[in-house]
Each structure stands twice: as structure tokens, then as C-alpha cells.
Amino acid sequence: MANFSILHIPTGHSETFTEFALTEYQDNLSTKYSETPVFGRMDPITTYQGTTRKISIGIRLQRPNKNQMSRLAAMQYPTYTSGSNALTISRPPLVRVTLGDLLTEQLAALDGFSFAPQTGFSAADSPIIRCDGNKQIIDFKSVELKFNLSILHETELGFDDQRGAITSWLGDNDFGPGELF
């Protein structure tokens, strides 16, 4: 079974999930161009500006750990240093994500984290509520987590004219023309 792990680069803290159901995986590539209309030409002059990659991952946990959920939410925030009269951001909340052979220690900005516990209409699928002294403790039977990631490329990707190969975005291999998938 594949592991899913997130390493918070500024602090070195990580969370790893070994027992989960993968409920969503979307890997979106968007190419951006700048278009300049010119007189006497039907089509604009189109200039390539860059390609971005955004990934959405959804998992379901059967036995969620509330402390683990809190640590994942905290990974959305930067680290601070104390100045003379205010806090200053010292490091942004970047992460390294691994998901089996789909993502291998991929550097990313965590654009969003969603925590959605299972709630229900009957005793069979509702959260468990316990009383511990004067406080009530709510334990969820399962929770859905969703992560939105903006991938930060650390290597050049694309077609290499000299080698005649395409650098893979799914791993470290080189593929010949037309063999990305």
C-alpha cells in the first residue's frame, strides 16, 4: 500500500498516512500565453509565458487523529521571528509531498486544506459523543481531507531539442516524443 506524507519544510514536522482511501486525485497543467494584437494580422502574436501545475488530493481516514489534523492545519501558516515590536515572517509554508509513485518528494505550496468529518442522521453513521468529567468529547468515525497544492518546479521540464526526449513530470524518467502517459 502507498503512503501519503507531507513534510513542512520550515519546521521539519511531517505527517504520514499509511491507512487511507484515496478519494480524489487531480493533476492539472495550465499553460499561459501573452497575446498581442497587431495591425494587419488576423491572429495575435502569441508568446509563451509559463506552465503551472496544480494538484488536488482527497483522502478518507477511518480513525482520524485530532492532533494530526491540527498539525496539518498549522502547516498552512508561515514561521515567524520576533522583531523589536512585531513578528516578522521568516519562512513561507512550503511542503514536500509524497503519494506512492504519483508524487515523490514534490516541492509545493499548500494552497488549501479541508477537514470534513463524517456526520449523519442516524446512530449508525453519526459521530460518537462521550462525556469525560464536565467536558464532552466528539470522536468522528471518519474524516475526509482535501489538499490543494501548487507545484514548484525544481528542474526544467519540457522537450529537450538536443536529446530528443521529454522530461517526465510523473517521475525522473525521460520519455521519447509522444510517451508522456
Image: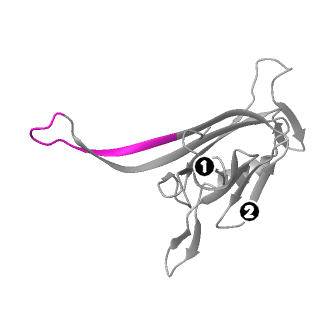
Amino acid at the residue labelled 1: Ser
- Pinpoint residue 30: horizontal percent, then vertical percent: 46, 41
In the image, what residue occupies the spot 82% across and 22% down?
125
Q: Quadrant of the C terminus?
A: top right
Asked whether 3 or 170 is in front, the reply is: 170
Residue 41 lies in the magenta-colored region: yes
Amino acid at the residue labelled 2: His
Asked whether 82 or 31 is in front, the reply is: 31
Give residue 136's quadrant in the image.
top right
- Structural distance between the alpha carbons of marks 1 and 2: 29 Å
**In this view, the mark in front (1 or 2):** 1
Residue 134 lies in the magenta-colored region: no
In the image, what residue occupies the spot 84% across and 33% down?
129
Asked whether 67 or 166 is in front, the reply is: 166
In the figure, is residue 69 to the left or right of 19? left
Residue receiving disc 1: 168
Up the image or down, 36 lies above or below 106; here it is: above
Element class at badge 2: loop
- Pinpoint residue 36: horizontal percent, then vertical percent: 21, 45
Give residue 24's quadrant in the image.
top right
Give residue 141's quadrant in the image.
top right
- Pinpoint residue 73: horizontal percent, then vertical percent: 66, 51
Up the image or down, 78 lies above or below 66; here it is: below
Q: Which residues are magenta?
A: 29-42
Of the two numbered discs 1 and 2 on the same chain, state the one appearing first in sequence.
2
Asked whether 164 or 117 is in front, the reply is: 164
Residue receiving disc 2: 13
Q: How is the image coloured?
A: one colour
In the image, what residue occupies the spot 16% across and 33% down?
42
**Number of residues whose C-alpha sits closer than 10 Å to that of mark 2, classed few (under 14), some (14–19) or many (20 or more):** few
Q: Quadrant of the N terminus?
A: top right
